[in-house]
Image (cartoon, rainbow, N blue to C red):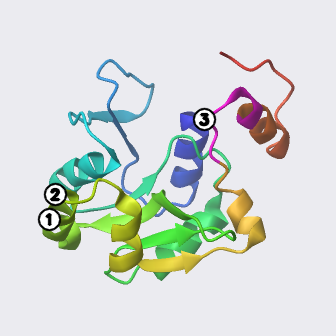
Amino acid sequence: MLSRVDRILKETRLFEEVIVFSKYERLQLKNLRVVNDSTEGTLIDSITNALEKFNVFLAVGGDLPLIDIEVVRTILEAYGGKPVAAVDADGIVEPLFAVYNHSILDSLVEFSKQNRNIFPFITESFDLVHLNETQSRKLLNVNTNEDYDTANKMIKCPKESSKT
């Protein structure tokens, strides 16, 4: 899945580099730079850590293999200096399909002292891009074997067994 996400992001020709930011210290990927997320907490901690390392970035979950150039351009075109996040057709905010920048670091740290859930912070502090049904399907999170099989069918991969 990471290889597909990497390929799509590189095909946009909009990024200087694709970096995998991961808690898995031993993760090594061919042709991909891996930066360790040394936090042990929630997504807020990981985002804060990433903001401390990178000034501005597009966060793309490694479990979003169906993204394509069109949906990446949609989120990037909405970025005008203020962080921006995708909202799917069902109204669900996707924190791992969002553009973050250093302007929110202090407020995110303060927010996280009282609330460990990033969703309210995003809805209050970000511009939101509402995706249509077609675009929303491209944000399928692959977290189970069934999701994996569904994603393979959607991208028309040859039949292969799910790995447990």
Q: Nearer the viewer, mark 3 or mark 1?
A: 1
* Residue 148 place in picture, x, y as percent: 72, 33
| Residue 119 lies in the magenta-colored region | no
Q: In this view, does 110 lie to the left or right of 163?
A: left
Q: Which of marks 2 and 3 is in front?
A: 2
Read off the residue under disc 1: 110
Read off the residue under disc 3: 1
Depth check: give the residue in front, 144 or 6: 144
Depth check: give the residue in front, 7 or 114: 114
* Residue 7 place in picture, x, y as percent: 57, 44
Is residue 153 depicted above or below 67 in this figure?
Answer: above
Read off the residue under disc 2: 113
Q: In which quarter of the image is the N terminus?
A: top right
| Residue type, label 3 | Met
| Residue 143 lies in the magenta-colored region | yes
Q: How far apart are marks 3 and 1 (CA)?
A: 34 Å
Q: In which quarter of the image is the C terminus?
A: top right
Neighbor class of circle 2 (other Cα within 10 Å; few <14, some 14-19, many 20+) is: few
| Residue type, label 1 | Glu
Neighbor class of circle 1 (other Cα within 10 Å; few <14, some 14-19, many 20+) is: few
Q: Distance between the residues labelled 2 and 3?
A: 33 Å
The magenta-colored residue range is: 141-147
Secondary structure under the numbered disc 2 in the rendered image: loop
* Residue 86 place in picture, x, y as percent: 53, 69
